[in-house]
Amino acid sequence: MLDRERFGTVIFDCDATLSEIKGIEELGREHRRALEDMSNAAMDGDVLLEEIYAARLNLARPNRTRVEEVGHQYVERLTADALEVVAALLAADVDVRVISSGVRPAVLILSRYLGIADEKVAAVDLRFDAAGGYQGYDRTSPLAASRGKVRIIEQWAATMARPVMLVGDGATDLEAKGVVDMFVVYAGVAARPKVMAGADAVIRHRTLAPVLPLALDHIPNSEPARSVFERGAALLGDNDSD
């Protein structure tokens, strides 16, 4: 693993990657089945995201309180080793960012918990009325449509250190493979065959530990980063032997 190039930037998806939950299903949990079906169709690449984005939020209609609750759920349901991986990357001066088609107020609760600066987080903003009721979303956001992550990463390009790694689980992440140097699919929550087939590397276990040996060119000296690195390297070795 130590002959790998050190990555300058690592970008994470949020839902079913940094956190095990899918935010839209929690925002509209009274309609979970319908929201799950729509989301899976988009993440599997069977429909375009823009075909279902407005419909999902119109069904969920999350108020400000619900959005904040989901932000805290993101934290409570962090993917195993996510906190340690992000901390180790930041300690190694890797530029860590978050890119998500989820709603920005909820995603920011997670990213702030992980120590990632707000300006390095891209997600879709919401509008609320004076009482905190749902009034809509930012329809100009690239992330509410297919290839939105491509556009955001292209906008970020001048400020990101290369090489760049993207870690995500769905078709909207795979779309961005051409504008990063490595696309790593996290299949620990949702294993999507089409996405896995197109990825440069696959994390099959329910942990983000393998990101460290993929991203760094040295074993960290401090704990728990060293243990997470070594465990991640072993899991990647398991993949290679499958």
Image (cartoon, rainbow, N blue to C red):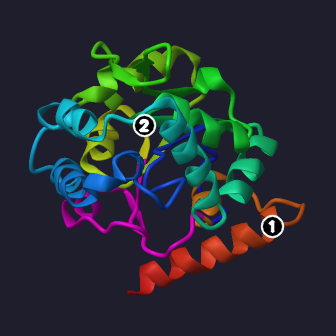
- Find residue 152 and report its horizontal and vertical position in percent: 40, 22
Residue designated by label 2: 100
Up/down of 237 relative to 187, above or below: below
The quarter in which the C terminus is drawn is bottom left
In reply to whether residue 80 is colored magenta, the answer given is: no
Amino acid on which disc 2 is placed:
Ser
Q: Give the label, 2 or 1, closer to the camera.
A: 2
Which residue in the rendered view is the most extreme toward the right? 222
Up/down of 95 relative to 211, above or below: above
Residue 69 disc label: none
Badge 2 or badge 1: first in the primary sequence: 2
Q: CA distance from mark 2 to mark 1?
A: 28 Å
Q: Residues within 10 Å of mark 1 (few under 14, many from 20)?
A: some
User: Is 202 or 205 nearer to us in this picture?
Assistant: 205
Range drawn in magenta: 183-208
Amino acid on which disc 1 is placed:
Arg
Residue designated by label 1: 226
User: Is 184 or 109 nearer to us in this picture?
Assistant: 109
Instruction: Give the residue at x 83% y 66%.
Output: 224
- Find residue 216 and report its horizontal and vertical position in percent: 67, 53
Q: Is residue 21 left or right of residue 162?
A: left
Q: Residues within 10 Å of mark 2 (few under 14, many from 20)?
A: many
Up/down of 210 relative to 136, above or below: below
In reply to whether residue 188 is colored magenta, the answer given is: yes
